[in-house]
Each structure stands twice: as C-alpha cells, then as structure tokens.
Image: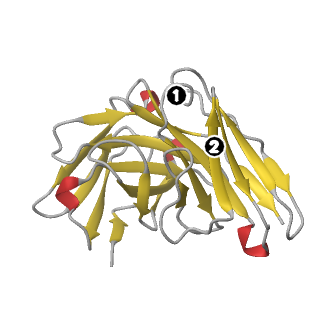
Amino acid sequence: QSALTQPASVSGSPGQSITISCTGTSSDIGRYHYVSWYQQRPGKAPKLIIFDASDRPSGVSSRFSGSRSGNTASLTISGLQAEDEADYYCCCYRSSKTLVFGGGTKLTV
Amino acid sequence: EVQLVESGGGLVQPGGSLRLSCAASGFSFRIFGMSWVRQAPGKGLEWLSAISDSGDSTYYADSEKGRFTISRDNSRETLYLQMNSLRGEDTAVYFCAKDVSRTITHLDVWGKGTAVTVSS
C-alpha cells in the first residue's frame, strides 16, 4: 500500500511558522477525518500531536495546528523553537481498514 | 502511569520466527484497540497491524498479510505479534501503540520499541 506523500524536509528560523503538507487520496484523507500527526525525536518513540485532523491532545502546545481539505492535510507549527526540530509523520485511516503513514518530514530549526 | 513495554526482539536468522510481546499498564487495556508499527533503520514509520478491543477483529497491512499474526490476552493485558518467515527487510524497531478508540483511528500511547535484526 502506497504511503501518504510528505516533503522530505522543511526548515525555518526560530519564531517563524512552517507548514508540512500530507497528500493522500479519496480513499483516506479525502474520505475520513481520522488524520493524525506524530512528532518523533531521534531515538525516541513517536508522540501524537494532532488527531482528527485538527484537534490537539492535552499537553500539546497550541503552536501546533492541523487542517484538512480535500485529499490533503497540513500541520502548521507557529513560533518555531529549537525543541521543535524532529521528524513529523502524518497518518490516516484508509477504506481498506488499515492505517497508512506518510514518508516523514525532517524539520530543521 | 500509562505505559507500554515491548519485549521479544533480538537477532534471528532469515526464515526464522519471533514473537513480540507488549505489556500494558496504567489504563484499561481491554477497552482499546492496539497496533504494531515498525521503523527500519533510517526509515519512516510503517503500520503493520491492529486488533480491536475484544480481539474479535484484526487488521493487517497488505505487505505483511499471511506472515504476521496479531493477538491479545486481555486477562494478562498483553499484546502479541507473531512473525514468521522473517527476511532481512524485516529488520527494524517494532513499536506497539494504544489506539484512542476500540479499533483503529489514532495512536496516543507508544512503547519505546524492541529491535529485531534478521541476519545470518
């Protein structure tokens, strides 16, 4: 099963905002709001930062926001901080009753 | 504290088998779906399989159907992944993760992972 499409890397300066896109199909992002985003620092387990496309778990900074339109989901990080440097993965439920991840985006601050 | 601890990883020869375990604590294991996700060295996350809260429903990525079997023992609060006919490309860190629902939606708690190396 093909992965969701993310840019391999993005970069930004402290204080700036960046957006990471995640492109799927009408069988996943275009059909279901079960889009999530995960942050993974080197050597660590992934951490859920966005679920249902735009909701934040308790404890996650409001600097992280998500959206979904058509077959594309987006993660925006505002007020970039050095600690945001990590890999970010989108994920979505698919009509084949599976989950599919994006290839991951390396954020450099 | 909500916690997932994987075990059972290690070095296995090509064609061999391995059973991974994931011990849960700090939450009501029996009412949440669970998943296995792996990450090959230097690569991205790959979802492998999920199981519903009761264990009645199982879900697999197309790539692993037939070789991997997910199961759970709610009395022991433990998730399992039986892996057969292992190949070099199965070398990865294997994570178990808790779903926010009874089946498959979002993964809100992750273990630290257990490493599997397939090599002769």
Q: Earlier in the sequence, mark 2 or mark 1?
A: 1
Element under label 2?
Answer: strand
Location of residue B91 in the rendering, given as x and y in whole percent from the top left corner: 52, 50
Rounded to the nearest angstrom, the CA distance separating label 2 from label 1 is: 15 Å
Going by the numbered disc 2, the residue's amino acid type is Ser
Residue B112 bears which disc, if any?
none
A81 lies above or below B29: below
- Contact (Cβ within 8 Å) of mark 2 with mark 1: no
Going by the numbered disc 1, the residue's amino acid type is Asp
B88 lies above or below B66: below
Apparent side of residue B80 relative to residue A44 in the rendered image (left or right) = left
Residue at left offset 79%, top offset 67%: A79
Which colour style is shown?
Answer: secondary structure
For label 1, the residue is A28
User: Pointer 2 indicates a residue of which chain?
Assistant: A
Residue at left offset 66%, top offset 67%: A42
The crowding category of the residue bearing disc 2, from other C-alpha atoms within 10 Å (few below 14, some 14 to 19, many at least 20), is some
Question: Could one spot residue B11 in this view of the protein?
Answer: no
B17 lies above or below B66: below
Residue at left offset 36%, top offset 34%: B60
Element under label 1?
Answer: loop
For label 2, the residue is A67
Residue at the extreme top of the image, as rendered: A26
Residue at the extreme right of the image, as rendered: A13
> Marks 2 and 1: same chain?
yes
Location of residue B97 in the rendering, given as x and y in whole percent from the top left corner: 39, 56
